[in-house]
Image (tube, rainbow, N blue to C red):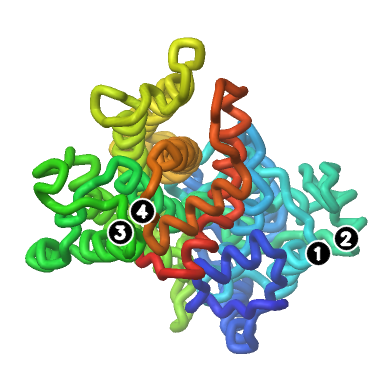
């Protein structure tokens, strides 16, 4: 399968198909026309000996240094090899593919001055599976993701390292094995390839896609716990939520009502108790706020994925203008918001877990195990979940409020957007584990109650868990059971089974 890029309408779903399902890419004919027109403007600038930043000058603080025509090719190569100074673990394969795709899509818009030949090389790398080795650290998130994007370009020059057919090798060897010719960068091309926000956007966009699934799982987890604790349905009455009409709140209440429909576990106001604790009663308000945040972030990511984020910009009129579209602040704030929104899902899930296992807060066996004392049951699962949500609180400190000057104070305010995106990935993993723990505990609690019937949606979730994980009669190596449950969240089976019955709306 192939997805056509034109710089204007790449969706998050299509990005995931390319990055995780190995869809191929190409660009439209009108995009090629724009690219060639932009390139001709750059070539005329060089021919006319004009002084233009990044074309016939140095970079950053060296913008006042003129470069001769004879040295322009050396300038572009030197830019790449000097800027490739990233550090840390390598970014995963799907993120690397996302970076490459987003850069191609931005260059398709025809405001960057790159040659069609160089762009075709990057497209061939995507389609033939040459994945540059890109360290995760080293970007300030302004002047673009300079260091990591430089690592992306190295194999195009026959330098650096890349993964090909699952094997890490030199960039030149990977390009040779894939049958892709290396390129010699000319005027502005190096800058066009590395001066953008594609690393932070790639990391954050894939996290966002996974976060949407996490929010669906969070409603399933809450509904299972609500039934396990014989919670009160009245708090989800849509009449309450429509008079405070935040869309995420309304959708969450409706999701829960659909999940627990036909349940006999669920109670009504005053039947067993008058009110539930906040973690049961305020699920629409808490989950809903995170959903509203996610939808805001999605709107910003959709804009960024289809934007020009380099400098200088080659306009349709032939002007070359220096600006600041490389500054990652829109993404930095968005991905900090993503971290906070996800952390809150973990926070409320861990508190629901506590209500499931704490015999002082329910009418179930202590720590959800028979023969307590000899067996510890789910006792320490809450410790582990508490550790994860506490770590998330540290990670949720916004990266975007930090800045540090660079390039001899020429670049004196930066976004730290790539750091914001990366830490949201850690938070997401922690939240997924906490939700898996809550779901497994809720299913355990449900099994202690007899003579009741689960809701239409919760029954499917319960069945999915029990198809893979047995009731825990006595202590077992608990992490293995939690791993199994987490895998059901990772591979999508839990959500898929539930959505075969009801639609979960974000």
The residue at the point 68 percent across, 73 percent down is 25
Q: Position of residue 73 (x, y in %)?
A: 71, 57
The residue at the point 43 percent across, 58 percent down is 212
User: Distance from label 4 to label 1 (Cα)?
Assistant: 40 Å
Q: Which residue is mark 4?
A: 219
Q: Secondary structure at mark 3?
A: helix
Q: Position of residue 197 (x, y in %)?
A: 48, 55
Mark in the foreground, 3 or 1 = 3
Which tag, 3 or 4, sits closer to the chain's start? 4
The residue at the point 85 percent across, 43 percent down is 169
Crowding at label 4, few (<14), some or many (≥20) Cα neighbours within 10 Å?
many
| CB atoms of marks 3 and 4 within 8 Å | yes
Q: Along the horizontal axis of the image, is 365 left or right of 2?
A: left
User: Distance from label 3 to label 1 (Cα)?
Assistant: 45 Å
Which tag, 2 or 1, sits closer to the chain's start? 1
Q: Secondary structure at mark 4?
A: helix
Quarter of the image for residue 351 reads: top left
**Residue 336 visible in the current orientation:** no
Q: Secondary structure at mark 1?
A: helix
Q: Which residue is more in the foreground, 144 or 240?
A: 240
Q: Which residue is mark 1?
A: 128
Crowding at label 1, few (<14), some or many (≥20) Cα neighbours within 10 Å?
some
Question: In the figure, 17 relative to 339: above or below?
Answer: below
Question: In the figure, 380 relative to 385: above or below?
Answer: above
């Amino acid at each position: 399968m192939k997805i056509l890029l034109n710089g204007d309408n790449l969706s998050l779903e299509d990005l995931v198909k390319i990055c995780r399902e190995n869809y191929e890419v190409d660009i439209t004919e009108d995009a090629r026309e724009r690219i060639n027109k932009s390139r001709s403007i750059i070539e005329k600038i060089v021919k006319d000996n004009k002084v233009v930043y990044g074309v016939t000058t140095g970079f950053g603080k060296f913008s006042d240094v003129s470069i001769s025509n004879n040295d322009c090719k050396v300038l572009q190569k030197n830019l790449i090899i000097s800027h490739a100074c990233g550090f840390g673990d390598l970014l995963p394969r799907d993120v690397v593919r996302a970076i490459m795709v987003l850069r191609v899509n931005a260059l398709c818009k025809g405001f960057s001055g790159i040659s069609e030949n160089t762009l075709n090389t990057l497209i061939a790398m995507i389609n033939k599976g040459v994945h540059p080795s890109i360290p995760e650290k080293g970007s300030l998130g302004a002047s673009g993701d300079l260091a990591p994007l430089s690592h992306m370009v190295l194999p195009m020059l026959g330098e650096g390292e890349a993964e090909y057919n699952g094997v890490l090798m030199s960039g030149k060897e990977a390009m040779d094995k894939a049958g892709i010719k290396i390129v010699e960068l000319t005027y502005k091309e190096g800058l066009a390839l590395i001066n953008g926000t594609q690393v932070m956007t790639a990391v954050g966009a894939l996290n966002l896609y996974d976060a949407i699934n996490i929010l669906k799982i969070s409603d399933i987890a809450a509904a299972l716990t609500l039934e396990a604790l014989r919670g009160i349905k009245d708090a989800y009455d849509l009449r309450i939520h429509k008079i405070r009409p935040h869309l995420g709140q309304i959708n969450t209440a409706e999701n829960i009502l659909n999940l627990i429909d036909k349940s006999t576990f669920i109670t009504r106001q005053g039947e067993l108790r008058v009110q539930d604790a906040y973690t049961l009663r305020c699920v629409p308000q808490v989950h809903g706020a995170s959903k509203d945040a996610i939808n805001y972030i999605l709107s910003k990511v959709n804009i960024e994925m289809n934007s020009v984020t380099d400098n200088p910009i080659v306009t349709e009129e032939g002007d070359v203008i220096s600006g600041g579209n490389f500054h990652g602040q829109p993404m930095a704030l968005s991905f900090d918001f993503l971290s906070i929104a996800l952390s809150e899902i973990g926070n409320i899930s861990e508190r629901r877990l506590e209500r499931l296992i704490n015999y002082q807060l329910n009418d179930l066996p202590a720590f959800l195990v028979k023969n307590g004392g000899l067996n510890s049951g789910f006792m320490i699962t809450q410790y582990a979940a508490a550790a994860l949500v506490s770590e998330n609180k540290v990670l949720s400190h916004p990266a975007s409020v930090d800045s540090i000057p660079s390039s001899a104070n020429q670049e004196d305010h930066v976004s730290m957007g790539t750091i914001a995106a990366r830490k949201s990935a850690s938070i997401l993993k922690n939240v997924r584990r906490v939700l898996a723990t809550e779901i497994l505990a809720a299913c355990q609690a449900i099994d202690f109650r007899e003579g009741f019937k689960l809701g239409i949606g919760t029954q499917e979730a319960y069945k999915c868990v029990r198809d893979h994980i047995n009731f825990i009669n006595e202590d077992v190596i608990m992490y293995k059971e939690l791993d199994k449950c987490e895998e059901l969240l990772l591979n999508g089976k839990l959500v898929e089974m539930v959505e075969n019955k009801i639609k979960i709306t974000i």
